[in-house]
């Protein structure tokens, strides 16, 4: 579906750019116009099955805060919170620990305007700040949490064939079927 909707002028697109367009294109990106999470969505994640996952992560977070020597203020940043269920259950757990709850400043980084609306509705009773970029975060201490966030990051993929580096590209010439191709590259041209 997304291959058909993707607007492109090139025959090939690097894998990371293809993933980015498929997931985050403002018009047709998978996460941008619908809620893929939960029983009505395309898949269910641990926080939507049971609150135990979120409660365990809450206790881990509190323990980590203790190991940081109980800072009076710190940021808890969730990356890509989906439908907001995990952080909602975590906030409810944090309320049972007043010293921690007072110190905790909750920040959410969400790329999808559609999912952000769902999160804001779900979390409207709580003090939560949404950001668009990690540069908006004040100096720490900072604790980052995420569930299945890294699964949705655009990535580059490389192969070393006969001591020559190749990057994976997507062949866009067939709008019905995705085909991956390897293109020779100069690996030294990428920033380290």
Image: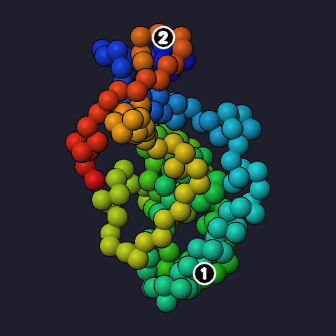
Residue at 49% across, 89% down: 69
Left or right: 161 in relation to 60: left
Question: Which one is in front, 125 or 92?
Answer: 92
Quadrant containing the N terminus in the rendered view: top right
In the image, is residue 1 above or below residue 121? Answer: above
Q: Distance between the residues labelled 1 and 2?
A: 50 Å
Secondary structure of residue under mark 2: loop
Residue at 36% across, 20% down: 12
Give the class, few, some or many, for how many residues have Cα within 10 Å of label 2's Cα (few <14, many ≥20). some
Which of pointers 1 and 2 indicates the residue nearer the eye?
2
Disc on res. 63: 1
Disc on res. 6: none
Residue at 70% across, 67% down: 55
Q: Mark 2 points at which residue?
A: 175
Q: Position of residue 44 (x, y in %)?
A: 70, 43
Residue at 41% across, 10% down: 173
Q: Look at the image and tell me whether residue 37 can be seen.
A: yes
Q: Which residue lies furthest to the front in this view?
A: 162
The quarter holding residue 24 reads: top left
Q: Look at the image and tell me whether residue 21 can be seen.
A: no
The quarter holding residue 154 reads: top left
How many marks the image carries: the answer is: 2
């Amino acid at each position: 579906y997304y291959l058909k909707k993707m607007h492109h002028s090139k025959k090939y697109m690097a894998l990371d750019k293809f993933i980015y367009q498929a997931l985050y294109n403002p018009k047709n990106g998978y996460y941008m116009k619908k809620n893929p999470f939960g029983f009505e969505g395309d898949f269910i994640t641990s926080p939507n099955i049971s609150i135990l996952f979120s409660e365990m992560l809450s206790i881990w977070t509190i323990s980590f805060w203790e190991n940081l020597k109980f800072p009076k203020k710190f940021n808890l940043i969730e990356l890509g919170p989906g439908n907001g269920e995990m952080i909602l259950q975590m906030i409810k757990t944090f309320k049972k620990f007043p010293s921690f709850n007072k110190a905790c400043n909750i920040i959410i980084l969400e790329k999808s305007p559609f999912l952000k609306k769902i999160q804001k509705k779900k979390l409207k009773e709580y003090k939560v700040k949404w950001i668009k970029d990690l540069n908006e975060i004040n100096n720490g201490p900072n604790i980052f949490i995420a569930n299945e966030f890294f699964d949705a990051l655009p990535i580059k993929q490389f192969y070393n064939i006969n001591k020559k580096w190749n990057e994976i590209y997507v062949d866009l010439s067939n709008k019905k079927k995705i085909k991956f191709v390897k293109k020779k590259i100069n690996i030294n041209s990428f920033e380290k």
